[in-house]
Amino acid sequence: MREKLRPAARRQAQTGLMLAAPVFLGSGIFFLLPFCLMLRYSLTFGIGGFRFVGLRNYREVLESPAFQLAAVNTVRFLAVGLPLIMALGLLLALLLRQKLPGAGLLRRVLLLPMVLPVASIVMLVQILFAGPGILNGLLEQWGLFPRQWLNGPESFWVLVGLYVWKNCGYNVVLFLAGLNMIPEELYQTAELDGAGPWAKFRFITLPLLIPSLFFGFIFGIVNSFKVYREAFLLGGEYPAQSIYLLQHFSNNNFRNLNYQRLSVAAILLFSVIFLLVGLLLWAQRKTET
C-alpha cells in the first residue's frame, strides 16, 4: 500500500514545486538578488569598478549628522505614534463593544481614512495647518500669534496626528474582532466571583486579546515606516528638521546617486525592523508559554 502511495505523493510534491516555482523565481529576482547587490554596494566604493572598503561606509553613515537626525526623528515618531494608536484603538474598541448609540456610524468614520487617497488627506491637512490656513486664521481672530505648523517643531505633532488618524481605524476593527471572540460566559463567571471591571479587563480581556495586540503592534510598526509619503507631501525633500525621517535620508542619497550610503541606510533600516519584529515574536511566545 505504501509503495502505491509513494509515486502519488512524489507526483503531488512535484506538482507543488512546479506551482511554487514562479513565486520562488520572482522572489529571487526581485528580492534576493537586489538585496545581495545592496549588500555589495554597502561594502564597496565606486560605480564602474568596485573597491572593497569593509565597514567604512557604515561608519560614515552612522557619523553623518543627517542620518543621526533622521534616526532620532524616526525613533521618536515610533515611540510616540505607536503607543497612541494602540491605546486609542483599544479604548475605542471597548467603547464600540458596548453597543452605544451611533456605534455603527463611528465605525464607518474610523475606517474612512483607510480608503482615502494620501494626497487628498495631505491636502486637507495643508488647508488646516498651512501659514494662511484655517487654524492660524482662528488664532488671529482670538488674538493669538499664528504658528508655523508645517515648517517648525509643531510639524512633528501634525505628522503624528495624521498617522494616528489614518491608522487607528484598522486597530479598532482588529481589536473589536478579538473582543467579540471572547466568550461572554467568562465575564459572567467572573461577576459571580465578585470581579470588578478592572479585574475582568486585566485577567480576561487583556490576556485573550494578546494575539490581536501583537498583530496591531506589527502593522503599527510597518505603517510608521510608511508615513514617509505623508511627510514628503507635507514638507518635500528637505522638510522641517522635526519630520526629517530615514526615508528622506535614503531618498536624497538616491537622487544624488550615492548608492553606497543608500544601501547602508536600507540595510540598517531593515535590521531595525527585523530586530523589532523578532523581539515581538519572542515576547509572544514567552506569553503563550
Image: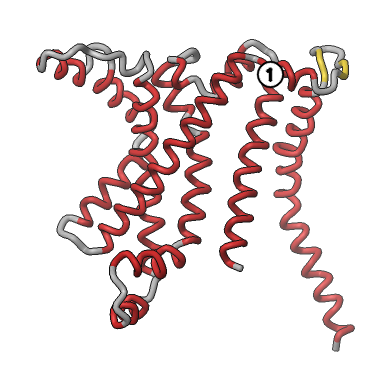
Please determine whether, in this image, residue 281 is positioned above or below residue 179: above
Q: Quadrant of residue 179?
A: bottom left
Nearer the observer, 92 or 19? 92
Please determine whether, in this image, residue 58 is positioned above or below residue 89: above
Residue found at x 78% / y 22%: 41
Nearer the observer, 197 or 263? 197
**What amino acid does circle 1 point to?**
Val
Q: Residues within 10 Å of mark 1 (few under 14, many from 20)?
A: some
Residue found at x 58% / y 15%: 66
Nearer the observer, 5 or 123? 123
Q: Quadrant of residue 27?
A: top right
Q: Position of residue 22 (x, y in %)?
A: 72, 49
Q: Kindly identify which residue carries mark 1.
A: 61
Residue found at x 61% / y 21%: 250
Q: In the structure shown, which secondary structural element does the residue marked by tag 1 occupy? A: helix
Please determine whether, in this image, residue 143 is positioned above or below residue 6: above
